[in-house]
Amino acid sequence: MRAETRGFTLVEMMVVVAIIAILAGIAYPSYMDSVRRARRADASRALMEAAAAMERYFSQNHSYAGATLGAGATDVYPGASPERFYTVSFNATPTATAYTLVATPVAGTTQASDKCGNFTLNQLSVRAVTGTGATAAECWRMN
């Protein structure tokens, strides 16, 4: 009488490994897209807070001119978003009546490959993105 052996054959193990690899190949890009989409809120939050700071500056100085962004004591808003996935800057030097804020993805983060690209917001609350393949409404969506 022969003893019964238990376990998996090499072929069975290879089939399981192949199935896992296929599922991972499908799931990972979808997961990374979800991560990028969730992190877009960091850009919109930073721009909305910076715009509020600009309006406070305007109400005190009756002009946007002279407002700065960065880490200095006189800057109206920091140069980075709260979660540090974006840098915040001006598109051009603010004038007495106008400004455009830009949130640029930080190089080396997953946001650098996001289809939305840079987020912009101006004194009229006009929202835009510079990326291709996505609309401003899609990128600025908070969910």
Image (cartoon, rainbow, N blue to C red):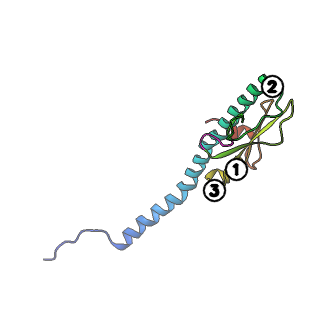
Circles 2 and 3: CB distance less than 8 Å?
A: no
SS under mark 3? loop
Tag 2 or tag 1, which sits nearer the N-term?
Answer: 2
Q: In the rendering, at what x and y percent does residue 128 appear?
A: 77, 39
- Magenta span: predominant SS is loop
The stretch of residues the image draws in magenta is: 79-83
Q: Nearer the viewer, mark 2 or mark 3?
A: 2
Residue beneath the point at 12% across and 77% down: 1
Q: Is residue 128 above or below residue 61?
A: below
Q: CA distance from mark 2 to mark 3?
A: 38 Å
Q: Which mark is residue 143?
A: none
User: Disc 1 residue type?
Assistant: Lys
Q: Which mark is residue 115?
A: 1
> Mark 1 or 2, which is nearer the eye?
2
Give the residue type at disc 3. Answer: Gly
Residue situated in front as seen by the camera: 131 or 25: 131
Q: What residue sits 62% from the left and 53% below the top?
A: 109
- Residue 15 within the magenta-colored segment of the rendering: no
Tell me the crowding category of disc 3: few under 14, some 14 to 19, or many 20 or more residues within 10 angstroms, Cα based: few
For disc 3, the marked residue is 108
Give the secondary structure at mark 1: loop
Task: Locate residue 80, reporting x and y percent.
Answer: 66, 43
